[in-house]
Each structure stands twice: as structure tokens, then as C-alpha cells.
Image: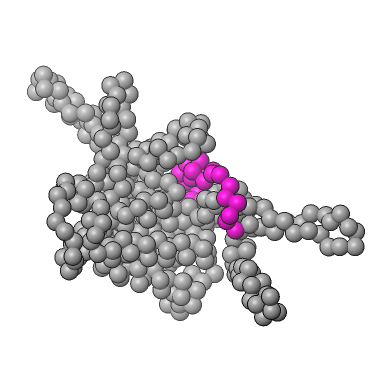
Amino acid sequence: MSADALGARLLGEVEEEGLDELFRAIRVQNDGQVGDRLHVPQIDRLLNVFHHGPVDTTSHALPTWTSSPHRDRPPIPTTVPLAANAREAVVEITSMGPCAGKTHLLYYILTLSVLPSLFGEIDLNGKEATVVVMDTDGRFDVHRLKTVMAHYVKDRALKSSSPDLSKAKWADQLESLLHMALQHVHIFRPQSSASLLATLESLPEYLLHGRTHQSHARPLSALCIDSISAFYWQDRYSTLTEPTTATTTTTTTETAAADPPTNQNNAYIQRYQSLVHTLKSIQQTFSCTVLATSWGLFPFQAAKPSRSKSRPVSFRPHLPAVWASYPTLRLVVARSVVPRFAPEMMVEEAARDRDARQEVVEKGRFGAWVDGGLGDGWTEVVREGLEEVEGKGRLVFWVRGEGVVFR
């Protein structure tokens, strides 16, 4: 073998890695778990459960050194493999329909992301970071976010030895705090999946070198897409109307809506492949969490319904498999339902219960649970973790006029 061929072969075996990738790998190796990722303990505990996994010996590994048997020779380099799922967290929040609490759950998470850790002597438990919101549904309400933030700060102040909340000076300080925090909430409103992808691709340049914002010194904590399903039907329609040589097949409505024909144009799936690839690249650069809301279109039907125990609602993913395998944690949220009046109930009895029922409705109780629709693919470690974690994969929160409250 010539020297040139040998050199080319050896050079081909060299793996290049950026310094940011090395630092991230070291951080993941040292942390082990996701830890206090969102500062919402109920969700962070679930993320820790799903971040346990087998070790992938073919993935990137960190170099370590063992002593050489020969004193005159340098230590022998070895490697410590990283976990296969040692990556940033991805949380998908879905529901059967609108007004189920998905966006308000985002408001609460974003509140903790942008607020500072301390406000005077008040412990806010904030991350003092930056967040980016892709408002694809056009329903993200900054005024509502500010209300949720204000309520959270006041609630934390009441639990501490804070100054009199009725003083005008304190109110001015609170307003200044909220104004400062909201400057680090960056909202984009793409109108199509192509626009969403282009916006995400330009995001690193905007955050790192943009001159129109003040978030350069802050880390990116969360990237939110509300919702990832917004362009689903639009993309489906554009795919199905494109010229194709596909043969006619008979499918059910649900199958046709969930999966394009295999001989159909691949542009539909390629859109989501590009989307996931770009999101992973952003997470690699900024070490941020991705939060995405979605529609629950197709509930799973249990093969053998159980009468002894009600099974939580779960949904079959309606987006391509490349997206379905991306989230670390999938949560289903729903508003607590007030039981209907019994058919045999008298009008007088219903009138007596009216105020009590209205009070329950106004309390705005919502529930969230781990979507078990893909539970067949869970490892035994995950199953055991869900049994041991507080709430067993369920959590409760309240959405009221003044804000969002977690138990």
C-alpha cells in the first residue's frame, strides 16, 4: 500500500467533532439525567423516567485514559459510551379538541423559563432564559401570558416574607419585571410548513447575531411549536393534489388521513424529516427543550375494554413516523368533566345543584397524563419508573382567570 493510500485511509477514519458537541457530550455524561429541565417538578420527573435507556456502544463516546503496562509509554485511550437517548428533551402535548389546556400549560412553562430565579427576596425558581414560540395556530396571546406571569409572581410573593403587595412601588417593580421578562419571548407566526421550516433554519443566526433583540446573553431554554398539527390538512391536500402515478386503492377515512399512500409523492414525509432534522440541529446548538402541541385525531381503541378500571385516553400519531418517534414524552391534557344530570333527576334537584356545579366549572381543573398509546415500545425500566414516580404518570393543574396553578 502506497503512502498516499495509507494516509487517505487513516484520514478517513478520523472523526471530526466541534467543541460545542464535545462540551455537550461531557455535560450529558456528567448529568446522567435531564434533571430540573423545565422547573416544573411534575413534568421533570416524567422526563427523567423516559430518559433512562440502554447504552449504545456505537454512538459518540467520551475519551478516558487507563494506565499503560509500560511506564515509558503514555496512557492508553479508551472510550465511555453515551446513552442512546442522551439527547435534549422533547415534549408533545396533545388533546382531543380545543380549550383543553395545552397552550396554558405552555404559558406556565414559559413563565418559569423567562423569569429570574430571584425577585428581591422572593424565590421565583425561574431560569432567566430565552424562549422562542412558533405560533402556527395564530392563537398565542401575549397578554394572557403576562397575566399568568403576574399571578405566578404574586403567588410566590404571598408564600414568602415579601413586602406589602398593595404598595404602588411594589406594583411598579412587578410591571418592570414582567416587561423585562417578556422581551425575551420571541414569537414567530409562519403561515405554512415551508415557512415554519425556513424560520427554524434561520433561528440560530437570529438568536446569535440578530441586532433587534436583547437575548444574546441568555441561553435558549425552550422552543415551542403551537401547534405542530397546524398545517397537517394543508400539507395533506397539497400532497394529494400533486401529479402522481399512484394507482387507485381503497382505504378507510382514518387510514387515508393518517398515512399517505406509499406510492404517493414523498414530499409530505420529507417535510417532516427536514423539520425534525432542523429541530435536532437547534437542540444540538442551544441545548434547549422542544415543546410542541398537537391534535389528538385518532384515539386508540382498546382490544378488550376493561370494566374494572377506566383506561386513560391515548391517541395514534397522525403525523409521519419520523415525528412520532421524536418526542421524549407525550402528554394528553383534558379538562375535568362535570358529570351530567341524571335522567331521573327532578328539576328542583337540578336547580339545587346548579351553583355547586358552576363552582366546579369555574375552578378550571385540568388533568394531564402520559400517552400510553405507544407503550408497547417502552422498556421495562420506563414501565417501572412510571409506577414509582409520584402520580404514576398523571398530574393536575388549574386554569383560572388570574392564572395557572399547579398542585
Left or right of 324 in this view: 236: left
Q: Quadrant of residue 375?
A: top left
User: In the rendered structure, does residue 73 fall within the stretch colored magenta?
Assistant: no
| Location of residue 170 in the rendering, given as x and y in whole percent from the top left corner | 46, 56
Vertical placement of 342 versus 84: above or below?
above
Left or right of 35 in this view: 272: left
Which one is nearer the viewer's eye here, 211 or 70? 70
Name of the residue lying farthest toward the right? 71
| Location of residue 268 in the rendering, given as x and y in whole percent from the top left corner | 28, 62
Can the viewer see residue 184 in this picture? yes
User: In the rendered structure, does residue 42 fall within the stretch colored magenta?
Assistant: yes
Quadrant into which the N terminus falls:
bottom right
The stretch in magenta equals 38-60
Left or right of 101 in this view: 352: left
| Location of residue 300 in the rendering, given as x and y in whole percent from the top left corner | 28, 38
Residue visible at 32% across and 67% down in the picture? 196
Q: Quadrant of residue 310?
A: top left
Quadrant into which the C terminus falls:
top left
Residue visible at 35% across and 52% down in the picture? 321
Which one is nearer the viewer's eye here, 4 or 129? 4
